[in-house]
């Protein structure tokens, strides 16, 4: 049985325990910060090897989620790295919240389907545990526009904690966001 190794980047304890139970070996390392260089030359080569795939006479760009993204509401997210299986980790900086506590960056964990046609689907979960009793899940697809710029079209569900079962009907919200690459 092969073991996969992941770095722990401010992951919730539940995610770490679930990963370990699934046969993943976890290594602790200091989290990356905006503007920091990639961890290794090997990571950069793996990312570049997935970025352009030759197909006939035309190159098709596959979506690379790594980097900073901004949505139509002003929220930002950073995806640290997408591994060869499509798993990724990052941080979400929401611009909107109904929580009473000040907004803080929140960890995200996700998976991307690595398609050669450049229209990759993905999903990720954001745990707002630092300032809210809610969790959000996003699903989406990456598109390459005629200008060559990547655009992420997403739909999301946000589950907020409620105290009483009769209030359950109002605990889940849904919405859509479009993300564009920053920089």
Image (cartoon, grey):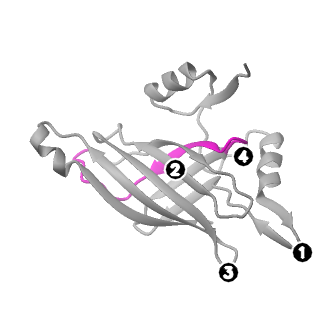
Q: Which label sits in the foreground, 4 or 1?
A: 1
Residues tagged 3 and 2 counted as in contact (Cβ below 8 A)? no
Q: Residues within 10 Å of mark 3 (few under 14, many from 20)?
A: few
Q: Is residue 182 visible?
A: no
Give the CA distance from mark 3 to mark 2: 24 Å
Disc with the residue nearer the chain's start (1 vs 3) = 1
Q: Going by the image, does 141 lie left or right of 64?
A: left
Q: Residue at x 70, y 56 (%)?
A: 115
| Residue for badge 2 | 123
Magenta stretch prevailing secondary structure: loop
How far across and down, in percent of the image, does residue 176 sit? 40, 64
Disc with the residue nearer the chain's start (1 vs 2) = 1
Q: Quadrant of residue 23?
A: top right
Task: Specify start and end residues of the magenta stretch as a single range.
Answer: 82-102
Give the CA distance from mark 3 to mark 4: 30 Å
* Nearest the eye: 149 or 84: 84
How far across and down, in percent of the image, does residue 160 sit? 25, 44
Disc with the residue nearer the chain's start (3 vs 4) = 4
Q: Quadrant of residue 127?
A: top left
Disc with the residue nearer the chain's start (3 vs 2) = 2
Q: Which label sits in the foreground, 2 or 4?
A: 2
| Residue for badge 4 | 37
Q: How many marks?
A: 4
Q: Residue at x 12, y 45 (%)?
A: 167
Q: Residues within 10 Å of mark 4 (few under 14, many from 20)?
A: few
| Residue for badge 3 | 146
Give the CA distance from mark 2 to mark 4: 25 Å
Q: Is residue 31 visible?
A: yes
| Residue for badge 1 | 57
173 drawn magenta:
no
Q: Classify mark 4: helix, strand or loop.
A: loop
Q: Quadrant of the N terminus?
A: top right
């Amino acid at each position: 049985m092969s073991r996969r190794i992941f770095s722990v980047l401010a992951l919730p304890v539940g995610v770490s325990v679930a990963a370990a139970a699934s046969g993943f070996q976890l290594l602790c390392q200091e989290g990356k910060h905006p503007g920091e260089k990639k961890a290794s030359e090997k990571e950069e080569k793996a990312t570049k090897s997935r970025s352009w795939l030759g197909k006939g006479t035309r190159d098709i760009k596959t979506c690379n989620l790594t980097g900073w993204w901004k949505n139509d509401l002003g929220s930002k997210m950073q995806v640290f790295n997408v591994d060869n299986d499509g798993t990724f980790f990052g941080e979400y900086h929401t611009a909107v919240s109904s929580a009473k506590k000040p907004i803080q960056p929140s960890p995200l964990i996700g998976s991307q389907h690595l398609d050669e046609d450049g229209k990759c689907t993905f999903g990720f979960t954001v745990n707002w545990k630092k300032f809210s009793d809610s969790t959000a899940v996003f699903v989406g697809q990456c598109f390459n526009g005629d200008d060559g710029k990547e655009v992420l079209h997403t739909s999301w569900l946000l589950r907020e904690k409620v105290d009483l079962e009769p209030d359950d009907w109002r605990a889940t919200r849904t919405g859509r966001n479009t993300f564009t690459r920053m920089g």
